[in-house]
Image (tube, rainbow, N blue to C red):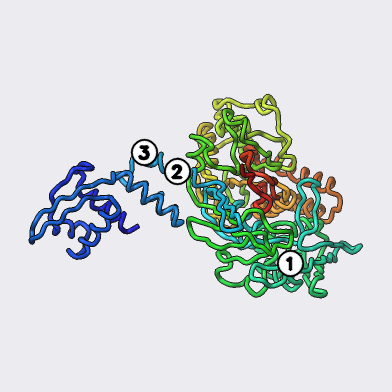
Amino acid sequence: MKLRDHYLRLRRHFPQAEDGQALAVALDELAGVLDCTHRNVTLLLKRMRAEGWIGWEPKRGRGSRSPLTFFCPLEEMLFSATRELVLRGDLQGALARLQTADSGPGLQERFHRWLGGYFGHRSEVRGARRLDTLRFPLSQQVASLDPAGTLFTADAHLVHQLFDPLLRYNRVTKTLSPHVAHAWEADLSRLRWTFHLRKGVLFHHGRELTADDVCATFARLRGRADGSLYGWVHRRIASVEAQDPVTVTFTLEEPCELLPQYLATTRASIVPAELSEQADFSRNPVGTGPFRLSHLDETLCVLDAFPGYFQGRAHLDRVELWHAPGLQEQERTRTLGSFQLLHNYLLPVEDDAGSWHQVQQQGATCRFLTFNLRKQGPLASPVLREALCTALHPAKVLERVGGDATYAAASLVRGDAELPPQQTQDEVQPPEACLEALRRAGYAGERLVLCTIPQYERDAKLVQALLQETGWAVEVKLLGAEAFKSEQRLQADLLLFSMVLDNDAELRLVDLYKSMQRHLEPSAKEAVAAKISTLLGETEALRREQLLLGTEEELRSRRLLHILYFKRLKTVYHASVRGISLDSLEWVSFKDIWFQTR
């Protein structure tokens, strides 16, 4: 790589030189350009000549000028150097090199075409074995692979590949299935739940999983419960005890019918007791999953198949996930290229045939606003909250968001029940009417603060624009994910959230409503708390759904919760991909994928 860099430095120093035409240069000048001794510059030039990059005929005598000819065009060397960085695993370095002044659009186009071919499925035969690798890009860096600390869906999906919980949600039957625990039961009081563990479940470092690991996992989660996702579950757990090496009992303070659902989440994945408190566990995780982590840096995450997986070895040998900002978006504007698998992708009409297929994700993502009534300000007035919700009518929001993946629905609880377009157009008020309503309501131009995390900045700006057009003064404030979970967000008037309404929707909605209690007015807080308390003791799923609907209606009728839009995408895969199934997070499960070769 260094030799290419030396060539590039030389070539840039003589921009006027034509490829294939000799120019006379002194050794002193070349030594100055490459910042090395005469002896070293001579060695470098000989190596470049051996590669066929230059012609060099040294002449004797101090101060003599010797003919130097460049044979390798600058763009060709830049492409070669950038490609080598990728092959060494440094995608970030390659993308940074493309930003140099002499890297024109032609080179960037060529590189992205090559990179598209580099991603996807590759097979290599070594002796009697065929090694199958799947490479694909991630739009954001991997933040944490600790089940207790994942904040983003992509990280949670990787945790799903590396770890296993006691139970798993079955998408086909829509029920919980045995997993690390092969059976479980609750006593008549619904306060004592016993789980029976499979024998022979191995961690990646070779030790067998036992009941002690389960106890240590939940003691660890309890210690991190404050402010964490589903932390309220642990406040209902009195103890987790090992009855013997393969039997664990959860004793509850009060009934929690969502406990089994929680035990099927990635958050509740079992970790080895002796390793989980290591400082670097989030970057060097050890689980029991079908893949184990073999490499992780800012650019590249590599998962290798775990041969000892208790539910059978994966068909793939390796999965490489590259942090390539913007690459998928660039590929979408060109072609599906060599990607065999793209998550959260809508198939273009012109490609929606032949060798490409789609699998519909069951869940949806919802963007919504909540109102912080702990802060004194104009939104303490229900009339002004009503005016604000009118300005953000779903039809207006959908028009601005665009795309056929977005839609309106009547409820968070029934987010898959899409409203007809005509129904979303009802009661849309023109901007002039919104301005007049705002004036009559007594709004004096006070500035509202809208807070969210950087990942949802685009939606926050959209809300800001719609409100400003109807007379509101709005400032957008972005907080990191950890800061957004803290009291810092309570300095804002409006909070913009995103929620994945997947198989864990019940848990997620309860988590939302418990989180919202921190910024509700007292009467609403009490009403929500009462409904959630009843829900957690309810054994019937239909009755729990009715309680969730009632909680949402309570909040929306008081204008404390406002839905912006829903979004549902599909996973696109090539006809050569076999074994496609979506996990509980709506991602493709890597374990079952295999590729049909010709």
Instruction: Identify which residue, 350 or 375, lies in the foreground.
Output: 350
Number of residues whose C-alpha sits closer than 10 Å to that of mark 1, classed few (under 14), some (14–19) or many (20 or more) = many
Q: In this image, 478 relative to 109: left or right?
A: right
Q: Is residue 172 visible?
A: yes
Q: What element carries label 2?
A: helix
Q: Which residue lies furthest to the right in this view?
A: 188
Q: Mark 3 points at which residue?
A: 105
Q: Which mark is residue 201?
A: 1
Q: Which of marks 2 and 1 is nearer the N terminus?
A: 2
Distance Cα–Cα, label 1 vs label 3: 52 Å
Q: Can residue 446 be seen in this view?
A: no
**Residue 214: image x %, image y %?**
73, 69
Q: In which quadrant of the rendered view does residue 93 lie?
A: bottom left
Instruction: Identify which residue, 432 or 534, lies in the foreground.
Output: 534
Distance Cα–Cα, label 3 vs label 2: 14 Å
Residue located 77% across and 53% down the image: 532
Q: Is 18 rendered above or below residue 212?
A: above
Q: In this image, 232 relative to 353: left or right?
A: right
Quarter of the figure that contains the C terminus: top right
Q: Which of marks 3 and 2 is nearer the N terminus?
A: 3
Give, as a three-letter code, the residue at label 1. Val
Quarter of the figure that contains the N terminus: bottom left
Residue located 19% across and 65% down the image: 39
Give, as a three-letter code, the residue at label 3. Pro
